[in-house]
Image (cartoon, grey):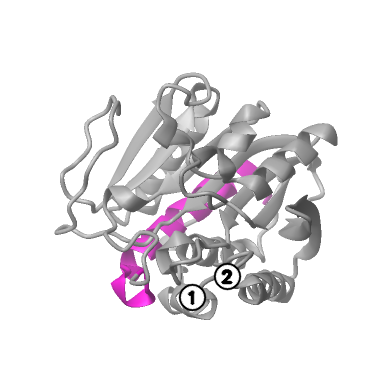
Amino acid sequence: MAFSELVSIDRIRNHIRALEGVRHPVAAPGALARSADYITAHLISQGYEVANHLFPDNGHQFRNVIATRRCLGRHQERVILLAHYDTVATTPGADDNASGVAVMLEVATLLSQLRFERTIQFIGVSLEENEREDDPESGTRGSRALASHARANGWHIEGVVVLESVAFAGDRVVQTVPPGVPVPVPESGNFIAVVGNERSADLVDGFSRAVKRQGDGLPCVTLTVPGNGELLPDSRRSDHAPFWDEGYRAVMVTDTTNFRNPHYHRPTDTLETLNMEFAARVCSATAGLIAEMARPRS
C-alpha cells in the first residue's frame, strides 16, 4: 500500500501544535499529564482499545499510554510503535519529541481501518529524558518500566519501532557524527537514521525496504551495532535501549537530534523550525514497516 499518498501533513502539524510546550515531571507536570490525555483521546477516536501502564518514579506515579488493536490471527504476537511524550525543562520540544508522537498518531490513523494477523500497539511513554543532565543513565525510565513489565508478563514482541525526533532535516542542515560510527554519514542532515542492534538487523532492513516501497525519495542511513550498543553509547540514547536490554528486537528511527539540530533541548525547538514534508515521508515509511511486520490480512 502506498501510504505516502495517504499521509496528512496537516494532521501531523496539528498534533505537534497541540503537544508543543514544556512537558516535564517537575517543571510542568500538568502539561505532561495533558499530553498523555491528548494521546489517549486521539487513539480512542481511531477505535483503539487504550489502557495506562502505571509506574512509580521519585514518589510519584506516571503513565505510559498503550493503545491496542487486537487481531483475529496470531493475536499474542505484538508489533509496537512507540514515542516518548515528555521533554526536558528548558524546551517546548517540538522535534524532541512532539514530532515522534505526531508521526506515531498519524500511523495509527492510517492503519486504523486495516486488518492484520498480529496485534499492533501504539505506545506513548513518559520520562525518556534524563532526570539528571550529567547522568545519561538517568533517562528512559518509562520505557525501562515498560520493557521490564513486558518481560515479566511474557509478552511475545515481534519488534519495537521507536520514533525519536523525526522532523528536523534539510539539504542545508549541517550534519555531525558521534565518535565511533562505522558507516558513512552524509554532510547534509537531509536523511533519517535507523539504528538497531544485531538481534534487530531484520527490522533495520525492513525500514529500508519500506522506504523503497513508498517511493517518495526519503534518504535513509542505517546502522547496526554489536551487542546492545555498549561500544557506541550514542546508539542507546532512546527508548529502544531498554528493550534491547530485555532481549527484544527494537530499532530507533531518528533525525539524529543534537548531531544536526541546533535547537535541541533549547527554547527554540518549535514547530516553525521543522520540515513537515520530511516528517510525512518518515511517517509513510514507518507505516509501511509496521504493516509489513503485522502481516496484513486480505
Q: For residue 289: magenta?
A: yes
**What amino acid is found at the position of numbered circle 1 in the picture?**
Glu
Mark positioned earlier in the residue sequence (2 or 1): 1
Report the residue at 44% width, 76% height from top.
Answer: 13
Horizontal relation, residue 256 to residue 151: left or right = left
Instruction: State the mark number for residue 256.
Output: none
Above or below: residue 46 compared with residue 181? below
**Res 205 visible:** no
Instruction: State the mark number for residue 20.
Output: 1
How far from the left and from the top, in percent, is residue 154?
A: 83, 33
**Res 93 visible:** yes
Instruction: State the mark number for residue 27.
Output: 2
**What amino acid is found at the position of numbered circle 2 in the picture?**
Ala
Report the residue at 67% width, 66% height from top.
Answer: 113
Please, what secondary structure does the residue beneath circle 1 have?
A: loop
- Between 170 and 109, the one lying in front of the other is 170
- Between 236 and 22, the one lying in front of the other is 22
Horizontal relation, residue 193 to residue 249: left or right = left
Which quarter of the figure has residue 276? bottom left
Secondary structure, magenta segment, majority class:
helix
How far from the left and from the top, in percent, is residue 147?
A: 71, 39
Horizontal relation, residue 222 to residue 249: left or right = left
How far apart marks 2 and 1 lie (CA) works out to 15 Å
Please, what secondary structure does the residue beneath circle 2 have?
A: loop
Report the residue at 80% width, 55% height from top.
Answer: 54
Above or below: residue 136 compared with residue 1? above
Above or below: residue 62 compared with residue 139? below
**Cβ–Cβ under 8 Å for marks 2 and 1:** no
How far from the left and from the top, in percent, is residue 58?
A: 73, 53
Bounds of the magenta segment: 269-298
Horizontal relation, residue 114 to residue 213: left or right = right
Density class for disc 1 (Cα within 10 Å; few <14, some 14-19, many ≥20) is many
